Image (spheres, rainbow, N blue to C red):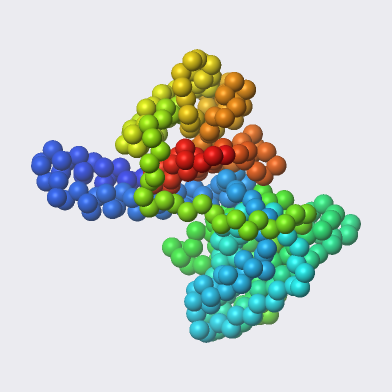
């Protein structure tokens, strides 16, 4: 699958070169569209693989899961279609979870789509939340430490799964769907997300009776943050001319980020490893923003570069760019003030919005 996508990208770029050489620039748009589409599909596939391996980048926040389910209810109803009856049972007094709400939404939608597909003649899906206190026996059964958890369960009245299918349900690339109709990464992705969030996912099923999939997430002792997520800016605000240090060992990414910054009117400095970046940061150069990859050669990763820089430049603003989650980047699930995290592959407008947000903020 991934090679097919790379072939679409590489082939489109080659045809663009041919058309430019021929002077037929009016035909470039279809190749650009094809390459962008293949890039998005490749990014989605990589995301699923990283989710299964528990190396995706998560942005955990205190989350009211009842509210999240309620906000998704209409989308789920439209997705499963009129032949499916949807029932939502939210527990009163549900505890808060520290979880990435966007990834939890993806997991819930995936579970509901699987439930729909198990009921080709129609049926009922029930989404239910509950508070759970796992004693020693329950914790062993669910392969979790003892303690307080929230459960989010999706049940269907469909065909159910055999014992053999149950054993393989969370294996990557395993699917019961016909060839070409499923990647086999949906449930393995949910499993990886749950485990990375400190929880677990369990399946309960009986052939002919239906299936229940339950996500267990640790209780978070804190209040739900009512702050709205950062919206991508449609128009980049004026930030003035600033100096930005870009650190990445991939020359193509450095080039693109530097060109974006120059389009925004900024001056750029470049480094391809951690020690070179630290040398620049230890100089007298005026540097307003550090944009750094997390995984760097030279013995210093991006987080170490940022920490070293902020010893002498305590007000330095930092954007980390990374293709997967690094334990060294986010401490206790939260980035420090004046820091942002952008995941690869990123849209340039997303990065430019984060740059503008940091450079115009008073954090």
| Residue in view at x 30 percent, y 42 percent | 10
| Residue in view at x 47 percent, y 54 percent | 231
| Residue in view at x 54 percent, y 29 percent | 316
Rendering quarter of residue 327: top right
- Looking at the image, is 135 positioned above or below residue 363? below
- Looking at the image, is 224 positioned above or below residue 274? below
Residue 122 percent across, percent down from the top left? 55, 84
Answer yes or no: is residue 213 visible: no
Report the front residue among 68 and 144: 68
Residue 7 percent across, percent down from the top left? 33, 46
Q: Can you say which quadrant of the picture contains the C terminus?
A: top right
Residue 130 percent across, percent down from the top left? 76, 69
| Residue in view at x 72 percent, y 70 percent | 129
- Looking at the image, is 167 positioned above or below residue 245? below
Q: How many marks?
A: 0
- Looking at the image, is 43 positioned above or below residue 362? below
Q: Is residue 65 left or right of residue 122?
A: right
Q: Is residue 293 left or right of residue 138?
A: left
């Amino acid at each position: 699958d991934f090679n097919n996508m790379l072939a679409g990208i590489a082939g489109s770029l080659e045809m663009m070169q041919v058309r430019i050489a021929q002077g037929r620039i009016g035909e470039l748009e279809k190749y650009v569209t094809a390459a962008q589409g293949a890039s998005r599909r490749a990014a989605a596939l990589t995301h699923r693989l990283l989710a299964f391996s528990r190396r995706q980048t998560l942005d955990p926040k205190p989350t009211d899961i009842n509210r999240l389910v309620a906000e998704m209810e209409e989308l789920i109803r439209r997705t499963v279609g009129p032949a499916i009856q949807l029932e939502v049972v939210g527990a009163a007094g549900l505890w808060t979870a520290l979880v990435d709400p966007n990834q939890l939404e993806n997991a819930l939608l995936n579970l509901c789509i699987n439930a729909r597909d198990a009921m080709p003649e129609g049926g009922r899906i029930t989404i239910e939340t509950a508070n759970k206190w796992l004693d020693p026996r329950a914790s062993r059964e669910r392969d979790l430490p003892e303690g307080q958890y929230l459960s989010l369960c999706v049940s269907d009245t469909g065909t159910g799964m055999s014992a053999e299918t149950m054993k393989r349900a969370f294996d990557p690339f395993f699917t019961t769907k016909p060839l070409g109709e499923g990647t086999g990464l949906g449930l393995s992705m949910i499993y990886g997300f749950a485990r990375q969030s400190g929880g677990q996912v369990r399946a309960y099923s009986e052939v002919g009776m239906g299936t229940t999939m339950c996500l267990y997430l640790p209780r978070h002792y804190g209040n739900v943050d009512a702050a709205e997520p950062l919206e991508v800016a449609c128009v980049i605000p004026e930030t003035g001319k600033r100096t930005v240090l870009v650190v990445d060992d991939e020359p193509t990414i450095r080039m693109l980020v530097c060109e974006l910054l120059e389009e925004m009117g900024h001056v750029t400095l470049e480094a391809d490893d951690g020690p070179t970046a630290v040398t620049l940061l230890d100089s007298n150069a005026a540097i307003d923003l550090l944009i750094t990859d997390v995984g760097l050669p030279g013995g210093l990763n991006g987080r170490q570069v940022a920490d070293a820089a902020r010893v002498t430049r305590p007000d330095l603003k930092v954007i980390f760019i990374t293709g997967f989650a690094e334990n060294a980047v986010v401490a206790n699930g939260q980035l420090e003030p004046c820091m942002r995290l952008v995941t690869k592959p990123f849209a340039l407008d997303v990065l430019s919005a984060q740059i503008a947000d940091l450079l115009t903020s008073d954090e």
